[in-house]
């Protein structure tokens, strides 16, 4: 069993506290007041409440940090950045689909150093710290070893509303005809956690935000996987397009996506 670094202990305290509230809300979805930010992009009372709980806990331990949050925006502080997504997969949440995560990541000098993803419904607590490996609860995570694309399951996001880009169906077609199956889970953090766990062999998506990606990118790296932009450029915290894989099929998927 890996001893968690102090930062992870604090993050776990925050997300588990928030998760208890989210678990209650999940059981009363029909009572939630839902308002639309844009078509297909919802924010609920739960989002706002969970973010508030996370901020209260994290700001107690990191009072001078800069906070980058999905709902509240940026709270200016020092060079240490804490990124928060209260519910990654809100649409899943409000439809009663138990695939979503509470995400917290820490960035220092433009590098992700720590991150957690917590699914309170399944009680899966994913965490990673630079150089400490990737973990789910007490289990060490490793990416898959599959190298034949026809035996691989690939995750992706299917764009909707104003996020649609012109050739996304061509990307889906070229990958799905070359692999064992395509999966759209509806939460980037869970997709990345599944790549780190070896459940998915790769995952790609475009037009994502840092709060969707921070913890998951570190999970994949610490589990022995590979991260880049979909065009093959190096991934940075400014990147919007992401390709994550077990490393063995990375170049092949990248080549297929860029033939379109």
Image (tube, helix red, strand yellow):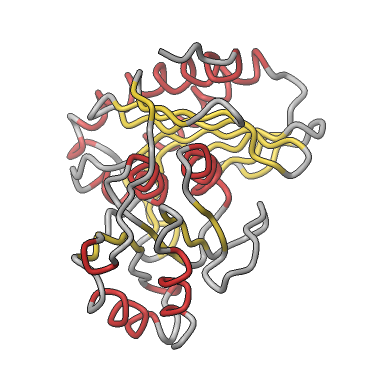
Vertical comparison of 183 with 258: above or below: above
Measured from the top left, where is residue 200 in percent x and y? 30, 52
Vertical comparison of 10 with 149: above or below: above
Vertical comparison of 182 with 114: above or below: below
Measured from the top left, where is residue 249 in percent x and y? 40, 63
Left or right placement of residue 182 versus residue 142 in this view: left
Q: Which corner quadrant holds the C terminus?
A: bottom left
Left or right placement of residue 64 versus residue 153 in this view: right
Give the residue drawn at x 41%, y 45%. Answer: 189
Number of numbered tags placed on the structure image: 0
Give the residue drawn at x 19%, y 45%. Answer: 97
Q: For residue 113, which quarter of the picture? A: top right
Q: Nearer the viewer, residue 86 or 103?
A: 103
Measured from the top left, where is residue 148 in percent x and y? 28, 65
Q: Nearer the viewer, residue 45 or 208?
A: 208
Q: For residue 233, which quarter of the picture? A: bottom right
Spot the residue most to the right.
78
Q: Which corner quadrant holds the N terminus?
A: top left
Q: Nearer the viewer, residue 215 or 195?
A: 195
Q: Nearer the viewer, residue 92 or 171?
A: 171
Give the residue drawn at x 52%, y 27%. Answer: 52
Measured from the top left, where is residue 85 in percent x and y? 49, 40
Give the residue drawn at x 64%, y 39%. Answer: 112
């Amino acid at each position: 069993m890996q001893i968690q670094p102090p930062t992870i202990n604090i993050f776990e305290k925050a997300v588990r506290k928030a998760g208890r509230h989210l678990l209650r809300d999940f059981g009363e979805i029909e009572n939630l007041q839902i308002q639309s930010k844009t078509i297909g992009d919802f924010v609920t009372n739960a989002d706002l409440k969970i973010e508030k709980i996370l901020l209260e806990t994290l700001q107690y331990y990191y009072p001078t940090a800069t906070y980058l949050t999905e709902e509240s925006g940026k709270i200016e502080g020092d060079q240490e950045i804490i990124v928060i997504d209260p519910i990654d997969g809100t649409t899943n949440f409000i439809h009663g689909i138990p695939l979503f995560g509470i995400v917290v990541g820490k960035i220092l000098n433009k590098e992700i150093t720590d991150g957690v993803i917590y699914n309170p419904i399944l009680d899966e607590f994913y965490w990673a710290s630079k150089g400490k490996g990737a973990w789910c609860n007490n289990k060490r995570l490793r990416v898959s070893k599959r190298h034949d694309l026809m035996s691989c399951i690939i995750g992706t996001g299917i764009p909707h509303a104003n996020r649609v880009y012109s050739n996304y169906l061509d990307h889906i077609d070229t990958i799905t005809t070359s692999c064992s199956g395509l999966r759209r889970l509806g939460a980037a953090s869970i997709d990345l956690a599944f790549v780190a766990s070896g459940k998915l062999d790769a995952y790609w998506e475009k037009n994502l935000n840092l709060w969707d990606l921070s913890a998951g990118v570190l999970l994949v790296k610490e589990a022995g996987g590979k991260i880049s932009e979909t065009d093959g450029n190096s991934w940075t915290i400014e990147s919007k397009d992401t390709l994550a894989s077990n490393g063995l099929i990375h170049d092949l998927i990248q080549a297929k996506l860029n033939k379109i």
